[in-house]
Amino acid sequence: MRIHSILVSLTITILAMTPLAACNRAAEEDAIVYWRTLTGRAGEAQDELASRYNASGPTRPVRAQFQGGYGDLRTKLLTALAGGGGPDITQLGSFEILEFARAGALVDLQPFVDGPDGIDLADWPGTLADSGRVEGGLYWLPFNVSVPILYYNAEAFTEAGLDGPPETWDDFFEAARRLTVVENGRTMRYGLALWDMTWPIVSAIWSEGGMLTNGDYSAISLDHPAAIAVLTRFQELVKEGAAILPEQAAGGHRAWFTSGRAAMILDSPAPYADITRAARGFNVRTAQYPAGTAGRVYAPGGGGIAILASCPEHKRADAWRFVRYLLEAENLAWYATESGYAPFTASARAIANDSHPEMADINGALAHIQGDFSLNMSPALRDAFDRAFMRIMLEGADVGETLRTANAEAARRIARDGL
């Protein structure tokens, strides 16, 4: 009798729970799924924004799901889309904008921007507002925008008789030489540790009036005279022993800087907290990148947000509301302060906390951003330029010849395979 009562009770409990479980499943399926990248505080802050959004009582909650690095995210998106699935919203690096837009995988955001729940782009840097445009559509909006900044060893500068960070690239190259310390034929400190990626170099080329490609790829110029001149100057530092391009296995440029083996690096604000914590025996200072003959012109980095075509039509308005939420001034400002990325709109900059040294440099650099991701969006151009850079710095290859070869290789690949 007792066993019978327990079974009856258990059956009643299961039956009572079934509608709730079904309801929970339905609610989960009805949620807006957001695939994100970035680790550490830059990732955690996105989860926090999703939680805050959900607490505001939206029609559909957002489920933020970490998918690994940008490369991992891209691979998972391709796999999901090929199988007819995928999230509703995704974070997307600038490298992937063109690829996914041309494949029809992204929703044109312009109708949402212009609609009743739209965004006023008046206080956005004009080039960033247009950076996600592909063949007439707006498929990507920037979110986690990075600006380049210079990190330098304050004590090394004082020791070398330098009274502040370099204002021009001429000053920069001179400083790298003066900061280099050699004892008994051994380099104890390099003036500069180079990153094994070309992002910082693009800002230098642009600020000297160079152009590596135009927006429609009808004028590819990896061998632009300014590019040849800039890379020659960096190569000269390497040949003279005033700069080094460390292997990632040895910690890369950041490890050489934080250990005091290099006095300057060109980097992003994102690792500021890690760099300052790791620095041994000196104070870390930051500054804007130097100016060239064309002034200060900076190549932004980072990623943005896109709505995927896999998002059902009936959910897209709600997906857009979360995108808009992420880009509201208060949220952009909070995210910038938490993550080290840039409060890139004027209204967000007015709110963002600039009490940290790197925030003042970020805010100052934003006025000089040129939101052109044409080089990033073309694998043919990006790969050719990256390979050329490594050959020039590591092998001492002739700069002009190497860039001309890279330009020709990129043009052939584009003609054969597309961008």
Image (cartoon, rainbow, N blue to C red):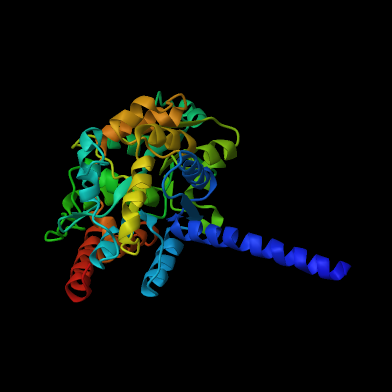
Q: Please state if 269 lies on the left or on the right of 236 as rendered.
A: right
Of 107 and 176, nearer the camera is: 107
Q: Residue at x 33, y 63 (%)?
A: 387
Please identify the quarter of the rendering in which residue 360 is found.
top left
Residue most toward the left? Answer: 218
Q: Please state if 301 lies on the left or on the right of 229 as rendered.
A: right
Q: In this rendering, does residue 89 appear at all?
A: yes
Q: Residue at x 20, y 50 (%)?
A: 111
Q: Residue at x 22, y 63 (%)?
A: 401
Please identify the quarter of the rendering in which residue 107 is found.
bottom left
Q: Is residue 307 above or below residue 322?
A: below
Residue most toward the front? Answer: 1
Of 122 and 406, nearer the camera is: 122
Q: Position of residue 367 (x, y in %)?
A: 26, 32
Q: Quadrant of the C terminus?
A: bottom left
Q: Is residue 365 above or below residue 196?
A: above
Q: Quadrant of the N terminus?
A: bottom right
Q: In this rendering, does residue 304 appear at all?
A: no
Q: Position of residue 398 (x, y in %)?
A: 27, 60
Q: Position of residue 165 (x, y in %)?
A: 38, 29
**Number of numbered tags placed on the structure image:** 0
Q: Residue at x 29, y 58 (%)?
A: 97
Q: Is residue 17 above or below residue 360?
A: below
Q: Position of residue 374 (x, y in %)?
A: 23, 55
